[in-house]
Image (tube, coloured by chain):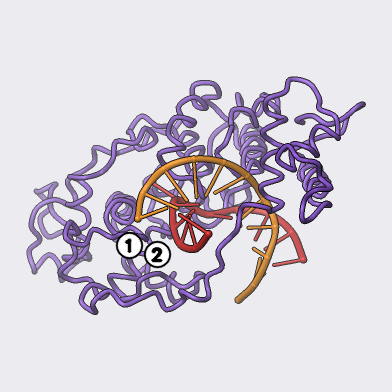
Chain colours: A purple, B orange, C red
Amino acid sequence: MRSNTAQEHGRTDHGTLSLAAARHNTGVPFPHCQDVERGDLTPLHHGVLAWYREHARDLPWRRPDASAWAVLVSEVMLQQTPVVRVEPAWRAWMERWPTPAALAAAEPAEVLRAWDRLGYPRRALRLRECAATIAARHGGVVPEDEAELLALPGVGEYTAAAVRAFAYRRRAVVLDTNVRRVLGRVADGVALPPPSLGRAERERAAALVPEDAETSARWNVAVMELGALVCTARSPRCPECPVQGRCAWLAAGHPEDAHAGRRRTQGWHGTDRQARGRIMAALRDTEGALTQEELLTAAAGGAAPEALDDPARPARALTSLVTDGLAVEVEGGYRLP
DNA sequence: AATGCGGGGAC
DNA sequence: GTCCCAGCATT
């Protein structure tokens, strides 16, 4: 398990920063004082960090006793699923499978049932594969190395950085949708970041991450939290923002999103994804197997598949679930793997 | 760079 | 109805 949670390392971002210290980040300005600031912190950093100390949510995976595995599980669940829906599922999950070895030994069907309606159930299978890899190749310890993290199923650039920062308190560039939005507004003066994450944006974010490892970890989570609670996508609460005085977007008068017309909105009703979701829900609620006819009817929302605008959709959804390993064909029908 | 992939809640 | 959410894998 992880021993370096260091949540209580704290206070490195507290207090006032002397200008002399700010200009000399190579030395130790006040070696006798533990509360002394690192030299690379700007008023922007102080504002966000102080705000976080006051307003951070008490989320279970942020507690100092949370294991690296607990952090990794939370990050995978939070990939496109809001915090309020993840929290209860995460608690039940961690109680049932506290370690990678425990999850690796679980039946995929039970994993998918526990995943319930978090969405994108392929993540549940990947997380189980991830657990198996950690158990088999990393001695049951979540790796700290970036390349090793990226090699894990379901772990991409964001999740690898998040585990390194939040579980291992390493300096990492955590760039999720919240951080991108906050930095885009404060620094670039745009309502929302561009659809794709580019090199320039990544380097700009990296330049803002404090040098000190523990402070960098707090900065990452603080900016993320600010984006989640104040600098929200829909109705930002600028009067409550600790850096409203230095926000380029606010100063410019909240200009509209330049990419507004270009963003594609993913439909839901009458889509393959809705049909897949209905099949998965039916399979989760069934111990054994369901017949193909029952599943195709479920995929059509209880109607006859032929009555749909796209009669092939139910069968296409079922086939794709089998391809993804989320359903398996057995005698007389299909069931969870 | 563009797509597909769940599901629910806010507006 | 639309939009958004601690993204990833694949093309």
Residue positioned most to the front = A307
Question: Cα distance, mark 1 to mark 2?
Answer: 13 Å
Q: Position of residue A199 (x, y in %)?
A: 49, 74
How many neighbours does mark 1 have within 10 angstroms: few (below 14), some (14-19), or many (20 or more)?
many
A130 lies above or below A114: below
A132 relative position to A40: left or right: right
- Of marks 1 and 2, which one's residue comes earlier in the chain? 2
Q: Mark 2 and mark 1 in contact (Cβ < 8 Å)?
A: no
Q: Residue at x 7, y 57 (%)?
A: A16
Determine whether the residue tagged by mark 1 lies in a helix, strand or loop: loop
Q: Which residue is mark 1?
A: A209
Q: Residue at x 15, y 69 (%)?
A: A245
**Residue A316 visible, this angle:** yes
Callout 1: residue from which chain?
A: A
Q: Position of residue A120 (x, y in %)?
A: 62, 45
**Residue A176 visible, this angle:** no
The amino acid marked with disc number 1 is: Val
Q: Which residue is mark 2?
A: A180
The amino acid marked with disc number 2 is: Arg
Instruction: Assign the C terminus of chain A to one quadrant of the image.
Output: top right
A142 relative position to A246: left or right: right
Determine whether the residue tagged by mark 2 lies in a helix, strand or loop: helix
Q: Residue at x 22, y 57 (%)?
A: A48
Q: Position of residue A226 (x, y in %)?
A: 28, 54
Image quadrant where residue B9 sits = top left
Residue positioned most to the right = A331
Image quadrant where residue A83 sits = top left
Between A25 and A188, the residue placed more toward the observer is A188
